[in-house]
Image: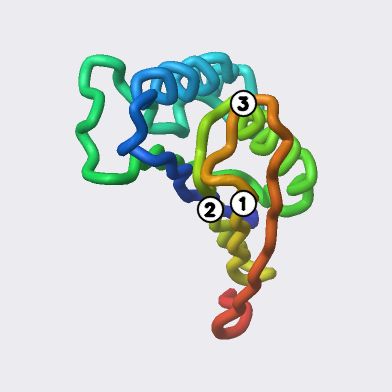
Amino acid sequence: MDQESIVYGCIKDTASTLAISEHIRANREAMLSLPHADEWPFISQEMFAIPQLDSPNSNYQTEVMHFGASYKAVEYEWDQWIAQFEALLSKMYWVSATVHLETELSGTHTFTWETKSSYHRPGSGDMRVRCEWSHEGGLHL
């Protein structure tokens, strides 16, 4: 049987700024610039809940953009996945981003991106990442 990896998480932006429509528009454009899943990228448009322009302020205080996908042993190419995800984040407005990587052999890894300022602006390069790892149980055959 093949090793399956599950990747899921969310990107959070503040929904209480005066420029919320600018943030939604920029974030939407960044996600729509991603390739489609049939082109086999690590990150594709189809894995994201892309914000809609016609429903600004639909969230209380935080704009949450969630995503998820199933892969065949993506942990062996994780550096490439991270590079593509950070390229996407560099084009977006956000406060924090969290990615969970669940693997059959290596347990669960949680990656969190934060910014030093109140929020990340596209192109600012103000990103810090940290990783936490947990492993429950043994190998199930």
Instruction: Give residue 137's position: percent from left, percent from top.
Output: 56, 85
Lower sequence index among marks 1 and 3: 1
Q: SS at mark 1? A: strand
Q: Residue at x 70, y 52 (%)?
A: 128
Q: Quadrant of the C terminus?
A: bottom right
Lower sequence index among marks 2 and 3: 2
Tell me the residue that label 2 is attached to: 98
Q: Residue at x 55, y 26 (%)?
A: 44
In the image, residue 31 above or below residue 61: above
Q: Residue at x 69, y 55 (%)?
A: 129
Instruction: Give residue 126's position: percent from left, percent from top.
Output: 70, 41
Q: Amino acid type of disc 3?
A: Pro
Of badges 2 and 1, nearer the viewer stands 1
The circle drawn on residue 113 is: 1
Instruction: Give residue 36's position: percent from left, percent from top.
Output: 54, 18
Tell me the residue that label 3 is attached to: 122
Q: Are marks 2 and 1 in contact (CB under 8 Å)?
A: yes
